[in-house]
Image (tube, rainbow, N blue to C red):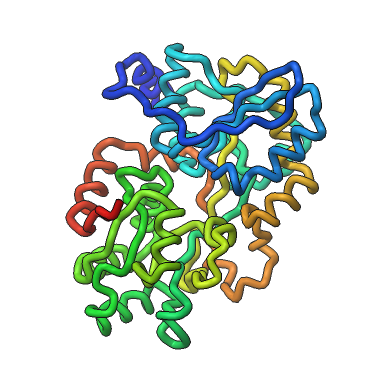
Amino acid sequence: MIRFLQAVLLLLPLTSPAPAQEAVTRFGDGETEILVRSTTDIGIFRPVMERFAELNPHLAISYEQWGSNALFDRSRDDCRGRGPQADAILSSAVQQMVWLANAACAHPHRSAATLALPATRRWRDELWGVTIEPAVIAYNKTLVKGDDIPRSRFALLDAMRNRPRFFRSRIATYDIAESGLGYLFAHSDSLEATTFGALLEGFSRVDAIATCCSAEIIAGVAEGRFVIAYNVLGSYILNSGAPEVGLIMPEDYTLLLSRAYMIPRGAAQKAEAIDFLEFLLTPEARSLLSRAGLFSELEVGETGLSGSALRFIPLSPTLLVARDANRRTLLLDFWNETFQRDVSP
């Protein structure tokens, strides 16, 4: 029934046209052209793309970088037959990817490599998680030190209660209306955290800032304009080149995200998209992803956290709840009552 309703929704018009991509880069100069659309910053993903192009000299790869909401809108529009589809899509807003797959927008593939993925990182032979990245608390190392570093949500709550003036307008997180990833983290928190309501109350009390993007948030922490950033992907901090920014994996629980890869049903170069997926699942690619901070062996690594504190966001139908219109409206209303918007240029 859910799949039928999702398919019916494909026939409905979009409320507004999808905006253009943020940036485009080409890799390789072969005769066969493929198009990859992704929410991953080109600068972070470049070594992976360069190596895949080197191994496949017959390819010319266009890599388009998108915001998550814009990528979802474009992919949904393309699935309706309103534009040429990408050959591969890679997004951090995995709830949107589950929606697309459930709406029959994905091309299936099965291999030994995909079947070797844990259940949290694959769904119905149509979505595959190719990274492992924690959502962390970032902080300015100069301004927040020692026992003042909040190592859990409970500690962050105490810090805001005890030093409201210090933190006023200096805590930032994603604007969940603008960021599909931010919305996913907020939705996951609302399900996991006994602290969720208290956190929003605390954020409201200190006039926390909701802003659009990882780069802007991390730059604000590095500059000292923000002293704390909540629920930021650790990979972006590791790639920021900002030694002033530290990160904490919250001890109460740490959300783990695996970016979802999908081959659109109408992709022109399905075989090449499959080759790219298979490459992303090789040890060589995993090593490149690890160097970029996009793959952390947290299951076996020394995180200092208990096993129960590592919470994977699974690629599964449960994420369709995050796309429920009523739930989304309630969460957005609750969120908008809490946060200021970042109005800086």
Q: Residue at x 65, y 54 (%)?
A: 292
Q: Where 162 falls versus 100 (above or below)?
A: below
Q: How many marks?
A: 0
Instruction: From the viewer's side, name the closer residue of 328 and 230.
Output: 230
Q: Where 188 falls versus 125 (above or below)?
A: below
Q: Residue furthest bottom?
A: 147
Instruction: From the viewer's side, name the closer residue of 146 and 184.
Output: 146
42 left or right, relative to 166? right
Q: Residue at x 79, y 48 (%)?
A: 283
297 left or right, relative to 177? right
Could you tell me residue 118's position as x and y percent?
66, 47
Q: Where 103 falls versus 51 (above or below)?
A: above
Q: Quadrant of the N terminus?
A: top left
Could you tell me residue 234's position as x and y percent?
54, 60
Q: Residue furthest top?
A: 81
Instruction: From the viewer's side, name the closer residue of 127 and 344.
Output: 344
Q: Where 243 falls versus 277 (above or below)?
A: below
* Residue 119 seen in render: no
Q: For residue 272, which quarter of the picture?
A: top right
* Residue 336 seen in render: yes
Q: Residue furthest front?
A: 345
304 left or right, relative to 176? right
Q: Residue at x 27, y 36 (%)?
A: 325
Could you tell me residue 267's position as x and y percent?
60, 18
153 left or right, relative to 116? left
Could you tell me residue 241's position as x and y percent?
57, 62
Q: Residue at x 73, y 29 (%)?
A: 28
Instruction: From the viewer's side, name the closer residue of 48 and 301.
Output: 48
